[in-house]
Image (cartoon, rainbow, N blue to C red):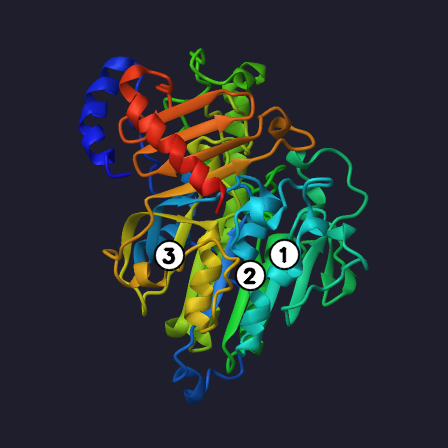
């Protein structure tokens, strides 16, 4: 990428002349300052011992949402005013495959999807039965003395793993959602993951009937608090996997009136320049097969997603409160991510994922540990595959050669640490839904550019600096030939990693 900086100045002039439709910032969300999260309490009879506090190994908590649009984090009061304000927020946090099961498998294995081979959410190309649990970092985490827990959503179609409710190796506490008699496609989501759900609890099947205490996000939060209580004197790792705000975007009853006019909660319509993009002549053919949702439909989905996320915000606030109560707040690192981004009308996509555009691949990516790292906004390019080696650095175990990601530990300590310039993005057509009409693609994403090749032979190239909303595809234009050739060669290298 040595020529990139020389080309940057030229590209600025060229793309400015390419179209009058280039992206301009839209109004940022209005901060919420009047809402207080609901904090669930738990009795913690003893605080961490001096011996535990003198152990340099941190506790690690991975909080993961499902299908969270990047920009919605602005409407999570506690996450915004505590985690973002006092943590490291990576503005360029991405997933390498923008789909639930492949992305979650990449988190567990540290590998690109083409290496762990979980390519979609369901068989024959994906799903939980395709994932080799021996690849999970949790096994090595256990080996070095960590107590481990996985709570909430695991991998899609986990119920197909035999025996039913089987607990994979590497986990001491396993309380994971199971589905039952599901109908409809994955994109439609399933109400039962919010109410009337079942869980495998260390291999035992437990049913949760619908009542005021059984909203799934709150159950996951309570399980997380119990794990903290029971682990005060041992280094621990915990994944807290919320189903929220996945469709059908269910919210806790206490948030029924949130973002309504009567509560004076302000919110801003999501209207980036790419919203239901009109001129798609420069885009791949599959975009013309999309049926854009109406503005009213997208507004409704947006509000429902924001309400659904408030119970996650409550959960994060409750976890931080429990850590303080246990005396563990200064030796615990919290990472907040989503398994993929989500469109809300971007480029004519409705509310969906799988695409190569920024709305699909960018995720909230926060590392919160005020006692370890100075708060900042970081522009480095980090990804889901980097979590495994980062955990290894903190916990003290060696990273297998099979891992594709890089440890963020040095970068978190020193933002001037040399870091990657680019990363691979990849997608395979899904078995149903919008993802089924998006051809197989591979992209290389840098700070300044994104270059995508589809199995159809179609190509896209965007200048992310001057066209952050990816409105003008400059692939094939003579003046961009040199940077396109350079990115094309780099993409072939990345596909071999």
Residue at the image position 61 percent from the left and 27 percent from the top: 434
In the image, residue 143 sits, relative to residue 162, either above or below, namely below
Residue 23 visible to the viewer: no
Residue 225's label in the rendered image is none
N-term-proximal mark, 2 vs 3: 3
Front-most of residues 346 and 420: 420
| Mark 2 vs mark 3: in front | 2
Residue 239's label in the rendered image is 2
Residue at the image position 51 percent from the left and 64 percent from the top: 400
Front-most of residues 223 and 262: 223
Residue 83's label in the rendered image is 3
Q: Helix or strand or loop: what does disc 1 sit on?
A: strand
N-term-proximal mark, 3 vs 1: 3
| Quadrant in the picture for residue 172 | bottom right
Residue 155: image location, x then y, percent: 65, 51
The CA distance from mark 2 to mark 3 is 17 Å
- Disc 2 crowd rating (10 Å Cα; few below 14, some 14-19, many 20+) is many
Residue 213: image location, x then y, percent: 66, 58
In the image, residue 273 sits, relative to residue 186, either above or below, namely above
The CA distance from mark 3 to mark 1 is 21 Å
Q: Helix or strand or loop: what does disc 3 sit on?
A: helix
- Disc 3 crowd rating (10 Å Cα; few below 14, some 14-19, many 20+) is many
The CA distance from mark 1 to mark 2 is 8 Å
Query: What residue sits right under mark 1 in the picture?
Result: 152
Total labels: the figure holds 3
């Amino acid at each position: 990428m040595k020529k990139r900086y020389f080309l940057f100045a030229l590209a600025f002039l060229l793309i400015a002349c390419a179209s009058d439709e280039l992206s301009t910032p839209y109004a940022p969300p209005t901060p919420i300052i009047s809402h207080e999260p609901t904090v669930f309490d738990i009795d913690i009879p003893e605080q961490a011992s001096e011996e535990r506090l003198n152990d340099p190994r941190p506790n690690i908590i991975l909080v993961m949402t499902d299908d969270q649009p990047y920009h919605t984090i602005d409407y999570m009061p506690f996450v915004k005013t505590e985690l973002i304000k006092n943590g490291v927020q990576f503005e360029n946090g991405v997933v390498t495959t923008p789909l639930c099961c492949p992305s979650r498998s990449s988190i567990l294995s540290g590998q690109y999807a083409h290496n762990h081979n979980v390519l979609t959410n369901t068989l024959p190309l994906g799903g939980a039965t395709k994932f080799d649990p021996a690849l999970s970092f949790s096994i090595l985490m256990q080996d070095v003395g960590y107590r481990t827990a996985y709570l909430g959503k695991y991998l899609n179609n986990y119920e197909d793993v035999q025996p039913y409710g089987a607990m994979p190796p590497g986990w001491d506490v396993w309380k994971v959602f199971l589905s039952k008699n599901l109908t409809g496609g994955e994109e439609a989501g399933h109400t039962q993951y919010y109410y009337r759900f079942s869980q495998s609890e260390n291999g035992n099947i437990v049913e949760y009937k619908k009542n005021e205490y059984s909203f799934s996000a709150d159950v996951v939060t309570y399980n997380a608090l119990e794990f903290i209580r029971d682990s005060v004197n041992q280094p621990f790792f915990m994944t807290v996997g919320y189903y929220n705000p996945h469709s059908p975007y269910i919210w806790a009853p206490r948030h029924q009136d949130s973002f309504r006019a009567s509560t004076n909660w302000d919110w801003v319509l999501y209207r980036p320049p790419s919203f239901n993009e009109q001129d798609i002549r420069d885009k791949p053919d599959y975009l013309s097969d999309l049926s854009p949702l109406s503005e009213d439909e997208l507004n409704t989905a947006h509000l429902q997603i924001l309400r659904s996320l408030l119970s996650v915000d409550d959960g994060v606030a409750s976890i931080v409160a429990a850590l303080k109560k246990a005396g563990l707040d200064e030796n615990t690192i919290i990472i907040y991510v989503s398994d993929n981004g989500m469109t809300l009308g971007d480029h004519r996509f409705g509310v969906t994922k799988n695409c190569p555009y920024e709305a699909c691949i960018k995720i909230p990516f926060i590392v919160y540990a005020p006692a370890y790292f100075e708060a900042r906004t970081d522009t480095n390019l980090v990804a889901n595959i980097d979590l495994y080696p980062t955990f290894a650095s903190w916990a003290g175990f060696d990273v297998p050669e099979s891992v594709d990601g890089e440890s963020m530990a040095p970068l978190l300590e020193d933002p001037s640490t040399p870091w990657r310039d680019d990363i691979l993005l990849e997608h395979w057509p899904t078995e149903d839904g919008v993802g089924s009409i998006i051809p197989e693609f591979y992209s290389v994403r840098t700070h300044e550019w994104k270059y995508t090749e589809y199995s159809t032979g179609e190509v896209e190239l965007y200048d992310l600096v001057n066209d952050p909303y990816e409105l003008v595809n400059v692939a094939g234009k003579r003046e961009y030939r040199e940077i396109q050739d350079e990115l094309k060669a780099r993409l072939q290298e990345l596909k071999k990693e």
